Amino acid sequence: MASISFQNVTKSFGDFNAVSNATFEINDGEFICLLGPSGCGKTTSLRMIAGLETPTSGRIYIGDRDVTALHPRDRKISMVFQDYALYPHMNISDNISYPLKVRGENEATRGERAQEVADVLKIGHLLDRLPAQISGGQQQRTSLARALVNPSQVYLFDEPLSNLDAKLRLEARGFLHHLQHSMGMTSVYVTHDQAEAMALATRVAVMDQGRIVQFATPMEIYRKPATTFVANFVGNPPMNLLPVEAMVSDNVLKVRADGLEVADIPMQRSFAEAVAANPKITMGVRPEHLRATAEAENVVRGKLFANENMGAEKLVTIERPDAARFTARIFTDDDIILTEDVALGFSSKHITLFDADGNRLA
Ligand code: ATP
């Protein structure tokens, strides 16, 4: 296994920067998820680690080797693709052991190794079949087995679960987590699914328009999103964000918006000065921190918009006078009966504030 280091890496296509000045370190044995919306530069970053794209500027290291200009073949990496890329005319055993064939291993060794890895992945009984004769989930595991059969320093995954249905996807996610836990392989995993990133990663790199906007543990990203973009991207449903007018006096912040009652918020002097200079801030509260009650430190009011029953939890959405919606995620398997006017309560410790540029204040 090995660490990976990006140093001021930029990749341009013409005058468009798909990845802009990325600098980060991935430690040996970490599972890193590159998370972000379509087109933010995740796959391009992965392909640069694999050697399928060359950086326009900057350097990439695997361990202490500068691999920036190294051929993919010489990088000791394995990659799992979204479409599995299995050979349709080869049986599962030959598909799995293909990298060993390229390396010149004999048939007996190839067969043994394929069986070993396939057994671990619970597809050992399917080795004689063709890809078309097994399910999507089994094809996905075949593609994983092919990556694992060849010991590598780094494993790269490009949305490997995206072709699976919801149930198989969950199962495969648990399986990958188990694999990572037991093998401790250095992995970089591209996804636009925040739940997948939260579940699998030791740290998540959130990308927006070619830039890494936050690189932190899943819980840090969840609890302390660096920007409104991250707050809005991570969490399901995402954090409720409400533009508010702010007033600061004696390092105490008062926020105002129609239908909002919020207690005074004590503030560090440096933040207070920033807010005084630009009082258009955004207040954020996660759905799971709202309760269907006005008996709370703070309250947001609106008209009932939706009351969705998810079994063990309910999603209650209100629409505020400014048309902004607020969703509460309430953990109960009882029905929630609501009138047309709804008050949602929350505690001050669950408020996140962002400055006028969308950066987290406190
Ligand atoms: P997705 O989730 O849709 O795969 P992504 O975050 O992986 O998106 P990339 O594939 O890295 O995004 O692409 C980033 C940007 O670079 C996109 O705007 C894309 O159109 C552009 N891009 C990628 N490859 C090329 C290329 N070979 N030539 C020109 N532009 C490209």
Image (tube, rainbow, N blue to C red):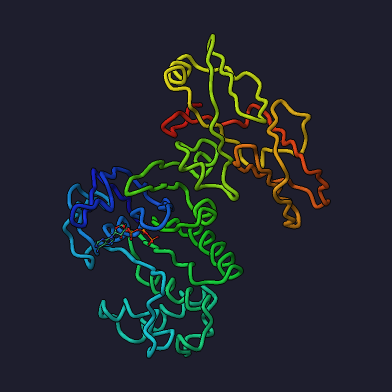
**Relative side of 248 to 152, left or right:** right
Residue at 48 percent across and 67 percent down: it is 162
Query: x, y percentage for residue 225?
Result: 49, 38
Percent position of residue 160, x then y:
44, 67
Left or right, 336 with respect to 188, comes to right
For ligand 1, the image quadrant comes to: bottom left
**Residue at point 81%, 45% (across, down):** 338
Q: How many marks?
A: 0
* Residue toward you, 230 or 327: 327
Quadrant occupied by the N terminus: bottom left
Q: Quadrant of residue 253?
A: top right
Q: Is residue 48 left or right of residue 309?
A: left
Q: Residue 80: percent from the left, percent from the top?
A: 39, 68
**Residue 255 visible in rendering:** yes
Nearer the observer, 289 or 115: 289
> Where is residue 243 shown, x and y percent of the image?
53, 33
Whether residue 67 appears in this view of the structure is no
